[in-house]
Amino acid sequence: MVGDTLGDLSGRLLVQCRPGQAKNAARVASAHGTGLVLTGRMPRPTVEALRAHGFTGPILCDANRYSGRRRAPAGAGTRESWAAEQHELGLVALTDSGYLAPHDWHGLRRILADARDRPGPTAAMLPLAARWFEHSVDGLAEEIEQHGVPVAVAIEHAKDPFGVRYVARGFVSLLAVPVPVILLRSDISALGALAHGTHAAAIGTTTRLRRIPPRTRRGAVGFPALRVFVPPLLGHHPLDSVSRLTPYWRCDCHECAGHPLTDLTRTARPEVSAFRHSLSAQLTLWSALDAADSPVNGWLEHCGRALSVHRQLATTQPAWYPPANLHSWTHARHPARHPARSDERAHG
């Protein structure tokens, strides 16, 4: 069996979903010539079903051991059997890593060493606390470079990690490492990451798949409002607010085909229409950016236009604030990296 390679992922905006969403996600991904990231601990049946039904795009499998109240720590190591199963399925393997708390240099080295020792194409899954990007990013980059393995990064945050300026700035600086860096569990910031040179990036289908949610105590489980991606705002907003915010905006994604966004509320299954539109609109936007002479400049121009629209809405909508991630990207650059072995890592 000819399997996926890291090269197959290059420049792709992937769709990260739960196995139960894979059928609808694969339909959109196929239309845009891209792949999926399946999030769950038993992906084999879903992978085999997708292949049996003709899905040919690349697939990654994220075991998600690093999230939830009983998440595993990075020091627990990774399982060889997990990587072997993905290789049997013809996939690039992601290690089933535990959570990397700030300054957990031992856990980081263990994950990287495990990935280096796996036969077949393997990327080290790095589920990082956001604080890694504040003061530890140079050391993180040096460890990745020394181990010489591709990495897939996901970032913990209560809302949006890229809404924090040091995260956006630190992530961009991490892209200076001479190995592929993949961003998982993101939202529209995945396009910013791709524009700045990340190997591949994934947009999540739900709020919890657009970041690593912090571990919390058991509490009441709510039912979030159905949210939809609004292209002029570069963000997700409640579907029932679309007619108030964007009564005349049309969408040129594959699902909307030039119709007003308000039509999403009038379909037989608004939740399915919103799901497919939200993915297709972001994939359409990335296709346009990827074809531009300068994806970075194109991305920054989109951020600037979206901020302008947000400011206009703020004049009429109470308590309306432009999203912090758009501001963060306008301040992210490729700073020169000066790796130095810190005392902290030497004793980690």
Image (tube, rainbow, N blue to C red):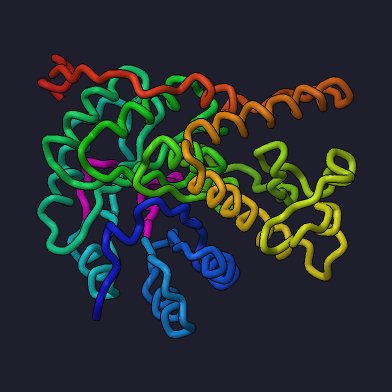
Residue 321, position as x, y percentages in the image:
73, 23
Which region of the structure is painted magenta?
A: 61-78
Kindly give the residue lying farthest to the bottom in the view shown.
52
**Residue 232 coordinates in the image, percent (x, y):** 72, 39
The quadrant of the image that shows the C terminus is top left
Is residue 329 shown above or below 110? above
- Residue 177, placed above or below residue 67: above
How many callouts does the rendering have? 0
Name the residue nearer the viewer: 220 or 331.
Answer: 331
Whether residue 304 sits left or right of residue 20 in the image: it is right
Q: Residue at x 31, y 17 (%)?
A: 135
**Residue nearest the observer in this picture, 134 or 218:** 134
Is 243 within the magenta? no
| The image quarter in which residue 12 lies | bottom left
**Is residue 342 shown left or right of residue 82?**
left
Q: Is residue 62 magenta?
A: yes
Which residue does the image show at 39% across and 69% down from the upper left? 43
Note whether residue 214 is visible: no
Residue 160 shown left or right of residue 67 in the figure = right
x then y, percent, for residue 187: 55, 43
Residue drawn where x is 40% and y is 74% of the image: 47
